[in-house]
Image: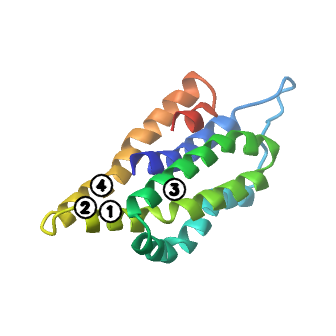
Amino acid sequence: FIISFGMRTNMGMAKLAMRNQTDNNGTPLHKWSVATESAMDSSFFVGYLITQVPGGFVASMYPANKIFGLAIAISSFLNLLVPGAINVSPYLDMFIQVIKGLVEGVTYPACHGIWKNWAPPMERSRLATLAFCGSYAAVVIGLPLSGCLNSWFDWSISFYVY
């Protein structure tokens, strides 16, 4: 979950760096309205919400570890496309974020499926708690790391690191 949540945190830090980016004339490169920025932020969760319950069914029918790994791999690939999409159009970014949400929506149910099959019954809750702590660790590590990467290099670098 560290990778998954790390990819979620870098957009907020990247937007802060993008606000300061200008062309040669001093014109901001990304002039978005508050509504557009809000839509960019929430578009991931539209897809994420849709696949939570179906993800549980899929994880019970197919190997949960493969579903989890495939979801993280596809989401990581889509994360690489975000900087280019932002430069093309905020709507293209929203589309990619919705697809990322659809893909990542299966990760929580798949993780439960992994522990159901691989962990001893008395250890399941402890191991699941440990696995889900990765989401909190990602925020603690990811936000400062994204901020440092954005200030040292470019706003897009954090999308390639995660």
**Which one is in front in this view, the residue at disc 1 or the one at disc 4?**
1
* Mark 2 to mark 4 CA distance (whole Å): 13 Å
Q: Earlier in the sequence, mark 1 or mark 4?
A: 1
Where is mark 4, residue-wise? 131
Q: Is residue 51 left or right of residue 129?
A: right
Q: Earlier in the sequence, mark 1 or mark 3?
A: 3
Residue 148 higher or lower than 58, as above or below: above
Mark 1 residue element: helix
**Which one is in front in this view, the residue at disc 2 or the one at disc 3?**
2
Where is mark 3, residue-wise? 71
Q: Image quarter for residue 115?
A: bottom left
Mark 2 residue element: helix
In contact (CB < 8 Å): disc 3 and disc 4:
no
Front-lying residue, 148 or 128: 128
The amino acid sitting under disc 4 is Ala
Where is mark 1, residue-wise? 114
x then y, percent, for residue 99: 64, 60
Measuring 20% from the left and 65% from the top, which residue is drawn there? Answer: 124
